[in-house]
Amino acid sequence: MQDASFEDGREVPLNLGAWDAEDLKILSSLAQDAVFPITEMRWRKAKRQFVLLVNRFRWEDREAAERRGRDYERVQSLIVVDNVLAVASQGVDRGDRELVLSLLSISFEPAEDGAGHVLLTLAGDGAIRLSVEALEVTLRDVTRPYRAPSGQAPDHGT
């Protein structure tokens, strides 16, 4: 009889939350290189939510894919930022309905009393800045993983 290993566990979708800057660093690392059409971005003003439906590279599965010689995977995920008071963007042509954006990072710039700004940094010098009353960000996988269309892992030349 042999002990179970981590690889024997079944894969489960991610469902993570971030309520402080340290939590957000982890969530950001898992969302890095997610791509999404501009049409999959919504500010639900009445609910004070900003929502993205992204195609997330499964960084948590990269080493296992390489070790087993199988394809890299992506999965559709929702990134939800709650407590949003205002949204601003820079370097994003919101009128271009064909535009596909690539998320590089999610960070938090604190202000007074827990408020601050969630900054979504995009490839190509774009950014989305969300003014929030308090930091609350969730990342939840909503589909089964699928083969990454490029067949490659994202590479930043490092």
Image (tube, grey):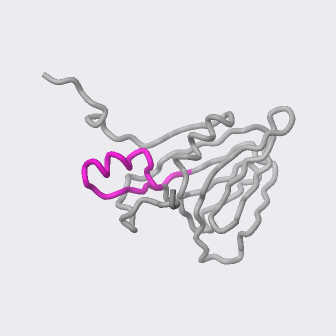
Residue 158, horizontal then vertical, whole percent: 51, 56
Location of residue 35 in the rendering, given as x and y in whole percent from the top left corner: 54, 62
* Residue displayed at 63% across by 40% down: 24
Q: In percent of the image, x 73 and y 69: which residue is there?
A: 91
Magenta stretch: give its range: 57-78
Q: Quadrant of residue 149?
A: bottom left
From the viewer's perspective, tell me whether residue 12 is left or right of residue 38: left
Camera-nearest residue between 26 and 52? 26
Q: Is residue 151 above or below residue 50?
A: below
15 or 70: nearer the viewer:
70
Indicate whether 127 appears above or below 13: below
Q: Position of residue 106 (x, y in %)?
A: 65, 49
Q: Position of residue 107 (x, y in %)?
A: 68, 46
* Corner quadrant of residue 152: bottom left
Looking at the rendering, which quadrant does residue 74 occupy?
A: bottom left
Q: Residue at x 56, y 57 (%)?
A: 53
Give the farthest residue toward the right.
112
The residue positioned 81% from the left and 53% from the top of the image is 86
Horizontal side of 141 relative to 137 (left or right) equals left
Q: Please determine whether, in this image, residue 9 is positioned above or below residue 145.
A: above
The number of callouts visible is 0
